Amino acid sequence: MTALTLSTAAAPGLRADAIVVGVAKGGSAKSSDLVVAPGAEAVDKAYDGGLAGVLETLGASGGEGEVTKLPAPSGFKAPVVLAVGLGSQPDKDASFGTETLRRAAGAAARALAGSKKAAFALPITDAADAGAIGEGALLGAYSFDTYKENGKDGKKDAKNGKAPLAEVALLGGKPRDRAYKAAVERATAVSQELNRARDLVNTPPNDLNPEAFAAVAQAAAKEHGIKVQVLDEKALEKGGYGGILGVGAGSASAPRLVQLSYTSSKAKKHLAFVGKGITYDSGGISLKPAGHNETMKCDMSGAAAVFAAVVAAARLGLEVNVTGWLALAENMPSGSATRPGDVLRMYSGKTVEVLNTDAEGRLVLADALWKASEDKPDAIVDVATLTGAMVLALGNRTFGVMANDDAFRSAIVEAAEEAGEPSWPMPLPDHLKKGMDSPTADIANMGERMGGGLVAGLFLKEFVGEGITWAHLDIAGPAFNESGPFGYTPKGGTGSAVRTLVRVAELAASGDLG
Ligand code: BES
Ligand code: MN
Ligand code: ZN
């Protein structure tokens, strides 16, 4: 795991493999003007103030995410200077913005894979900037190589890729300032847990079934003083969890419901986070066609996000109670699988006609939402890779936010924005509920095709306890990155929604949520 520290060292004498500086597009008349961003004055001085000119000669434009490497000036202990683009320069004295810094740090850390230590001399105006740069660097340094030969032991060769950056030092911060120290601690805890969520998502489904996921959660809970309870198939049967059992019925690996309880003696609020944890979604008897199931190990991304957020909340000692619910099952076709046409009796007592076994996420979530509601938390937030329709609506980088309370929905979207995660509010139009009417049962698990993401949200709403504030995050788009890496986002599992949930917990702790 990459280590993060604040350093007061001066750039020239610093022992590192590279020094990272920022370069921006100057705001003036000539749009080709490059400016070296604040924080890199000592580096620029060593080039006799000509760093921007050198970068321009090398073809740098200052565009976001652009990376230019050049030899360090003579006299520097570090051999390389890496300039990362920050986009347009902000107005005088304004910060570049935390998300711009986070992405730039991520792009730099990715480009430095194979190096041991890098010093980041990016523009820092306050502790939040330092935290964002730290977060971006730790998230950008992520790699998943458990299944590569020579993986995880540091002994990489060209064939197996380069080891991630091991050490990040932030220059220009205030190592003795409490706010800066807290920002670095927060960045470290959140990034490490988020990277752990990515590991879970990337782990192939033959190695991460519901039982294995539950075991990982149990071990982490023990390590961080979180109370944990795992309901296995027998307990689920006894409790009447027809949704979770129905989805898991076709699999050789039995389902689980995991409850993680983090409590603070100073808590005034109680949040429940509920995660969809389909460790593999084949579609079941309504089997997905080839081309639609290759990435379906990602269908437990919601549960991974909830798990990571609860552990991060515990590590940060947030003054709020957080209960995490992981609804874990594998959706497979077999002779024992739930059929289209079957009726399930859910934990809430409602009956559901299963018209399409590929609409399984809402079934496991329904049981977990009803169970979570029994504690009467102040709010419930569920996270799920729920519908392809949400991907069509919002694309691959934005998650949809639905809620039974408009103010709460806005609060969640705002929290996501603060955390650096793109999201968008979506409605839950009542008229779409009718499409889920079933001649046989209380409700069907499918409705109109149009607005499929909203239909799924409306289904979930039926399983939220009376009077409980609830929001639903459909992360089907951003949870898994099938194209190339960008900023601090790698290919594969992204850790979507972890930072939003942590931010929501922080806001609840300070009494500022909605
Ligand atoms: N896990 C899928 C949704 C999904 C799609 C996640 C793409 C990530 C990327 C979900 O279980 C599913 O299959 N949903 C169906 C619902 C439909 C049958 C009503 C869908 O969206 O097609
Ligand atoms: Mn499905
Ligand atoms: Zn699914």
Image (cartoon, rainbow, N blue to C red):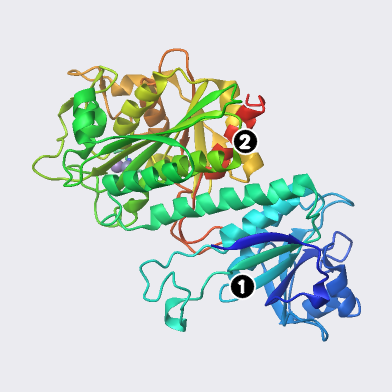
| 165 w.r.t. 474: above or below | below
Which residue bears the numbered disc 1?
112
Mark 1 neighbour class, 10 Å CA radius: few under 14, some 14 to 19, many 20 or more:
many
Q: In which quadrant is the C terminus drawn? A: top right
> For ligand 3, which image quadrant applies?
top left
**In whole angstroms, how far apart are the C-alphas of marks 1 and 2?**
31 Å
Q: How many marks?
A: 2
Of residues 46 and 436, the one drawn nearer to the viewer in this rendering: 46
Q: Is residue 432 left or right of residue 262?
A: left
Q: Position of residue 240 (x, y in %)?
A: 22, 23
Of residues 47 and 207, the one drawn nearer to the viewer in this rendering: 207
Q: Is residue 213 left or right of residue 77?
A: left
* Mark toward the start of the polypeptide (1 vs 2): 1
Res 168 visible: yes
Res 480 visible: no
Q: Position of residue 196 (x, y in %)?
A: 47, 53
Mark number, residue 415: 2
| 175 w.r.t. 144: above or below | above
| 42 w.r.t. 441: above or below | below
* Image-quadrant location for residue 327: top left
Q: Position of residue 6 (x, y in %)?
A: 74, 59
| Disc 1 residue: CB within 8 Å of ligand 1 | no
* Image-quadrant location for residue 283: top left
Name the mark nearer the viewer: 1 or 2.
1
Name the amino acid, label 2. Answer: Ala
Name the amino acid, label 1. Answer: Leu
Of all residues shown, which one is farthest toward the bottom?
74
